[in-house]
Amino acid sequence: MKLEELLRFLAREITGACGNITDYDQVSRWPKGQLEELMKLGVIIEAPPGSTAVCRKCGEDCCVEPTIVTYPDNRTVGLFSCGQDGHSIELSMEHFKRWEVLPDKLAELGYEPPTKDEELTNEEAAELLGGGISAATISKWVKSGLIKENGRSGRQHRVLKSSVLLLKDKREKEQKIEEAKDFIKVQNGKKKSRLIA
């Protein structure tokens, strides 16, 4: 992700559920050096650490609130049990870091937040699309880029309603085209049967 793309992303993110706070989980996905560059630009400042973190150990991207433990060697970690397999998992304190995005600085650089898009859970998106679509299908479509998301994970993950509505419109148009093709086939079949008779 180029710096310009990241600045646009941040301008969009500050309108989301978490406002202008971004966490370690999000920042760890950015290309190396971009956090430091954003801090130099004054777009991001360090915020107080959070009490939750995202665990990706079992692939579920769970939002967890670990117990903070300090070992005799003065190493401090977050400790919790995985809800999937019960294993005890340690997270370094780095996972609790958070940063504040400064909207005024983004605006100075020409990156205004867009009009806020409504966010939906996968279940709400599936219901809006109808036709037997499941939340799991919505997840697949998000991963493939067919539906846009808010960039968060775990309980904060949502899809953008505008993206879901665009897909719904596209699917409805495709369905109408298929119905028209079927109608034409039926009409052509009737013509052929009249010619034979």
Image: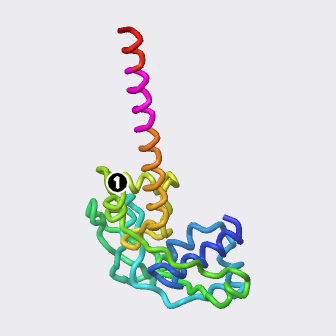
Residue at 32%, 73% (x, y): give it.
80
Which residue: 72% across, 81% down? 110
* Amino acid type, label 1: Ala
* Residue 177 location (% of width, % of height): 46, 41
Say which residue appears at 58% left-offset and 88% top-offset: 46
x, y (%) of residue 54? 42, 71
The quarter of the image holding the C terminus is top left
Q: In which quarter of the view is residue 61 placed?
A: bottom left
Q: Residue 100 falls in which quadrant of the image?
A: bottom right
- Magenta part mainly helix, strand or loop? helix
Tell me the element at label 1: helix
Magenta-colored stretch includes residue 184: yes
Up/down of 176 relative to 185, above or below: below
The magenta span reads 179-190
Q: Is residue 104 left or right of residue 79?
A: right
Instruction: Work out whether 129 lies above or below 113.
Output: above
**Is residue 84 inside the magenta stretch?**
no
Image point 49% across, 59% down: which residue?
166
**Residue in front for this viewpoint, 105 or 191:** 191
At which x and y percent is residue 1? 66, 64
Would residue 120 appear left or right of 102 to someone viewing this image?
left
Q: Nearer the viewer, residue 192 or 27?
A: 192
Q: Is residue 155 above or below residue 194?
A: below
Q: Mark 1 points at which residue?
A: 136
Q: Nearer the viewer, residue 21 or 196?
A: 196
Looking at the rendering, which quadrant does residue 136 occupy? Answer: bottom left
